[in-house]
Image (cartoon, rainbow, N blue to C red):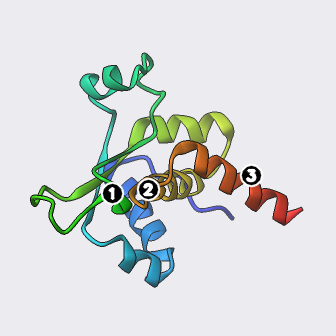
Amino acid sequence: MAAPQPRTQAEFEIVAQEVWDALPLTFRETVGNLTIQIVDFADAETLNHLGIRNRYGLLGLYHGLGLPFKSSWDLPRGPDMIFLYRIPILAFAHGGMEPVRDVIQHVLIHEIGHHFGFSDEDMERIEESAIADED
């Protein structure tokens, strides 16, 4: 029997934590100073900046400077952050009839990829390569 889909903020946070904990330890340690925030939707300023009109159109966002672009000479800044947008993730999972856990995992890994300096195009190529390798 499949695990129930998270409905509340607290249930979503538990699933997100489980997804994080399931990532390989060396991967989690390499991420470093990274904060994960779960909010219902991206704010209007973020959506406008990205040119996204539908607030359901953004599932997650990396905010920070990717590791390859940092220098020990940089002035200290706040922690790099990943935002998981709860309601769009739930809607996407429901619409695609996918487990929320799988969508959270995909979004989280995608945003961590940005932390490591990968572009969206880089990650699409990596995903396509992984799918081709499975065939």
Vertical arrangement, residue 89 with respect to residue 127, above or below: above
Q: Residue at x 45, y 33 (%)?
A: 58
Q: Is residue 84 left or right of residue 113?
A: left
What x and y, as percent, mark residue 16?
A: 42, 61
Q: Residue at x 67, y 38 (%)?
A: 96
Q: Is residue 127 above or below residue 1?
A: above
**Identity, as a three-letter code, of the amino acid under mark 1:** Phe
Q: Are marks 1 and 2 in contact (CB under 8 Å)?
A: yes
User: Residues under labels 3 and 2: Cα distance?
Assistant: 18 Å
Residue depicted at 60% across the width and 38% down the height: 94
* Disc marking residue 128: 3
Number of the front mark, 1 or 3:
1
- Image quadrant in which the N terminus is located: bottom right
Q: Quick check: 100 left or right of 98?
A: left
Sequence-wise, the earlier of marks 1 and 2 is: 1
Q: Earlier in the sequence, mark 3 or mark 2?
A: 2
Which residue is outermost to the front? Answer: 73
User: Where on the picture, by quarter, is residue 50?
Assistant: top left
* Residue at the image position 60 percent from the left and 43 percent from the top: 121
What's the residue type where badge 2 is placed?
A: Gly
Give the residue pinned by disc 2.
117
Q: Earlier in the sequence, mark 1 or mark 3?
A: 1
- Nearer the camera: disc 3 or disc 2: 2
Residue 17 drawn at (x, y percent): 39, 67
- The quadrant holding residue 14 is bottom left
Q: Position of residue 98 (x, y in %)?
A: 65, 47
- Please name the amino acid that badge 3 sits on: Glu
Mark 3 residue element:
helix
Q: Which residue is mark 1?
A: 69
What secondary structure is marked by label 2? Answer: loop
